[in-house]
Amino acid sequence: MSVNVKLYIKKILFSTKPLSILKKMEKFQRVLLSASCLLLAVFMVGCSPPENHIKCSSTNTNCTITNSYGTFPDRSICQAANAAYPTTEEELISIVAAATKAKRKVKVATRYSHSIPKLVCPDGQNGLLISTDYLNRTLEIDVQSMTMSVESGVTLRQLINEAAKAGLALPYSPYWWGLTIGGLLSTGAHGSTLWGKGSAIHDYVVALTIISPGGPEDGYAKVRSLDESNSAELDAAKVSLGVLGVISKVTLQLQPLFKRSISYEVKKDTDLGDQVASFGRQHEFADITWYPSQGKAVYRIDDRISSNTSGNGLYDYIPFRSTPSLGLAVVRATEDAQESLKDPDGKCASAKLITSTLKNLAYGLTNNGIVFTGYPIIGYHNRLQSSGTCLDSPEDAMITACPWDSRIKGEYFFQATFSISLSVVKSFIQDVQMLVKLDPRALCGLEQYNGILMRYVKASSAYLGKEDDALDFDITFYRNKDPAKPRLYEDILEEIEQLAVFKYGGLPHWGKNRNLVFNGALKKYKNAGAFLRVKEMYDPLGLFSNEWTDQVLGLKGDVNIIKEGCALEGLCICSQDIHCAPSKGYLCRAGKIYQEARVCAHVSTPEQ
């Protein structure tokens, strides 16, 4: 299918006049997108599960690791000498001790490897990967105290399901359930709320056990059991980027299982900046999806209700479902064609089709687990808080897959995710709206990935958690398979990143983002020094650190990778034209409204 698509595009491009090319491509794209949207929305059945992201040439030796998207920000594949798969805490302690005694670099790998940055890469080729695949047991559920203890390899889905069986609930969680508890804690993953302790799971941790390097007197592995009695170390370990050791066990504070009521309301975005702070305080599970080029925002009106209310709703988010590989290939080929032809109108038409299809299908919400009959959706919290059914299914020879599976021609994207304090978020939103006014089509590419997801987060006691009550912006956009090719509206997207991170002091999501978003990040955390002191105490040799974490933590160099075309991939902020794509007319220029920004802008007339 994807080959035929490519051939058809070439036939159009090389056999017609320029004016008719655009008309035929627009018609071609509409047909493709209509067909593929129907496929993506309706034909959602079995799925090839994700592959193991650790690959070894022989039994657990000579290994490589990448993430679930098949690509780190610098497009490298990381190497390791060995991979270990402990099944008990005792085995884990033994593995850490042996690595410490040999002074080997160690990194922890999770089941589905969903972090975008290079958190899992041991330095060099002689390192060790410790997988938590088999540390996946529920250890204890105490209904009376409403706590639950699990091993760190337990997935969010397992935790939600096991808690519900005991009549308990994790009150807030990420929307994707393919994360492990150890992984989501290490990266500060969260849901959306300003209520209670907030939406970050690490703020519901009451105890955890972490295995770190030790001295000879410890048998070369030190087991630390942390709780509120040693809160300083616990606040460091709650969000640690994996540099303190291996989390083996986590105890979470839960709540009685409850029901929710969910409705979506579409409004114009003219007063979005004024609405965001109050909306998050009005509704417990509020979030907003913003379509800037369409001038619309979708408000999620989502609240806890009485468990006596009838309803058995289910959330099975459509972009997280098993998807036909042929349909994904069509969507990607269409997007590639739009980029090659520099066709913003095609992108905007595609975006409207995609967003309207998702809206009409209630984004995957159903009133009874089968069909959507109207809002509100009433159901138990565990059936509505998270989803990801593309992980579930048996092998089907790649007929279907998770949309981002790197083994197929599917989604290939960048993500920029940052949290901006509620005290200044209105101004940031208005700046983005000013950029859109300059060309209303500029952000249609984001809307092809269902716009900008805005989630609420609260200030946290975790040293690397959020500093203020904030709004988190999750932006997904097209990435070219060729790193030397600039994107349509390259400069607008770069300016938004730099506005967020530098003008408004946005904090990065530790498990997402391109390199530039991490520039100077640690200076924004008031407890950064306290975190580094705990790190030095736990791992003085830096065995659980790597080049990337050292750069992010300000210990060695910085995250910029300066080379030709580096700004196109977010590996640097351009300071010279060569950091962009001068041969393609993209030069390093100041931002359009944020003059301090330096972005790769298309200059139609060569400058002398």
Image (tube, helix red, strand yellow):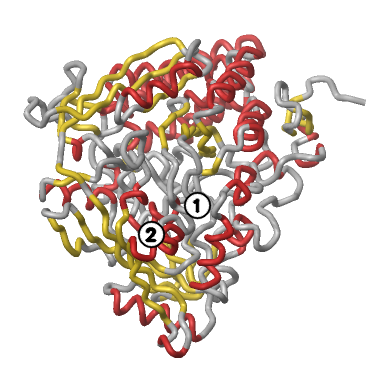
Rendered location of residue 375, percent (x, y): 21, 17
Query: If the image is split into quadrants, where does the C terminus sit?
Result: top right
Query: If the image is split into quadrants, where does the N terminus sit?
Result: top left
Instruction: Say which of 86 and 97 sits in front.
Output: 97
At numbered mark 2, what does the secondary structure look like: helix, strand or loop?
loop
The residue shown at (57%, 37%) is 506
Rendered location of residue 121, percent (x, y): 53, 63
The residue shown at (50%, 32%) is 475
Could you tell me if residue 407 is visible in this image? no
The amino acid type found where label 1 is placed reads Leu
- Decide which of tag 2 and tag 1 comes sooner along the chain: 2
- Residue 464: numbered disc: 1
Q: Badge 2, how many Cα within 10 Å: few under 14, some, many 20+? A: many
The amino acid type found where label 2 is placed reads Thr
Residue 517 figure quarter: top right
Residue 357 figure quarter: top left
> Is 299 rendered above or below residue 527?
above
Rendered location of residue 293, percent (x, y): 53, 16
The residue shown at (39%, 61%) is 231
Rendered location of residue 385, percent (x, y): 26, 37
Instruction: Say which of 178 and 125 sits in front.
Output: 178
Q: Answer left or right for 418 relative to 566.
A: left
Q: Residue furthest right?
A: 608
Q: Residue furthest front?
A: 229
Residue at image mark 2: 110
